[in-house]
Amino acid sequence: MGEAGRYMGLLPGRMDGCAAGRFGGRFGRSVVEKSIIEDEGWQPTDLANILFWVRSDKGIILNGSNVSQWSDQSSNNNNYIQANAVFQMEYQLNKINGKPALWSYLKYMDMTFTTPVNMPITIFSVYKMENSNLINALFDGFTSNHRIAAYWYQDNNLYMSGNSGQFPYSKTIPFSNYIINTHIFSNNGGSVYENGVLKNSGSFSADYLDGIRLGSLFDLGYRFVGNIAEQVAYNGVLSASDRAMVETYLNSKYALYE
């Protein structure tokens, strides 16, 4: 466990051959949907247009107890990387429903895309913010000209923004529990959900991304304090039923809400 660069394949992924989008559009959030996920081994890669999928129970490369790479579990090889040990997040066991998470105290990781990724993008994040004394950034782009951001501000609001413009929803930190945030970014605005419930929609401008900075704003001025357990992203806006499938998968895994 302590060897630099040792690969952590802790819980091998399960694939059952479901075609992409097999269940999309057929079910809302229901007992049937939950059964599909738990009994048939549904995974985020079963939907089309996945951009990346990182999970704390697989694909971790360690530098001692710190994470140097968080490997994409889709076939796209969009990995989060931090080569500088000073800024590496810490790998912690038994943090959420008996599963591990990455702990960050002002740390960050970068995911660089080989070709620019255009809007719209849908991003699901399972995380918990811990520090209310700072501007707490979950993710952003690399530059002020090409960015999508999710961050908490000291007015007790979680914001999402693009190149220009932003909108909030009310949220106090430290969080009492981990949450699933679903952020939908388009060229002229977006929407944010918490645990499957729409919290707000608004306007901003966004065009494309060269990459994603996890745990910091683009300029490294404000960083994340808390734990991150999983993140899934898709090109495009998912249908309501497909979005519910991903949220139900995450909730079934981490037992976050009824």
Image (tube, grey):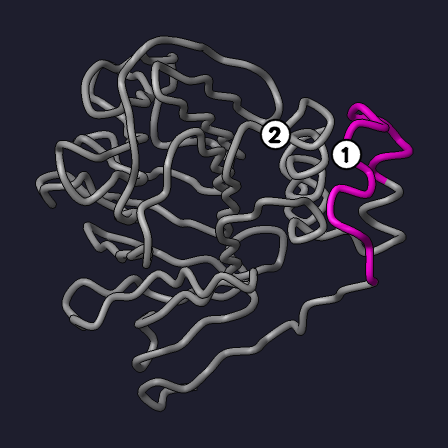
Q: Where is residue 100 in the image (x, y as percent from the top left)?
A: 52, 61
Q: Which amino acid does label 1 sit on?
A: Gly
Q: Is residue 254 left or right of residue 4?
A: right
Q: Is residue 258 left or right of residue 206?
A: right
Task: Determine contact: label 2, label 1, CB under 8 Å.
Answer: yes
Main SS, magenta residues: loop
Q: Which residue is drawn at 56% across and 78% down?
A: 9
Q: Quadrant of the C terminus?
A: top right
Q: Give the range drawn in magenta.
A: 17-34
In the picture of the structure, the residue carrying the numbered disc 1 is 24
Find out whether residue 168 is within the magenta segment: no
How crowded is the residue under tag 2: few (<14 C-alpha within 10 Å), some, or many (20+)? Answer: many
Q: Position of residue 74 (x, y in %)?
A: 56, 60
**Height in image: 125 above or below 158?**
below
Q: Which residue is drawn at 58% across and 45% down?
A: 49
Q: Where is residue 14 in the image (x, y as percent from the top left)?
A: 75, 66
**Height in image: 72 above or below 5?**
above
Secondary element type, mark 2: loop
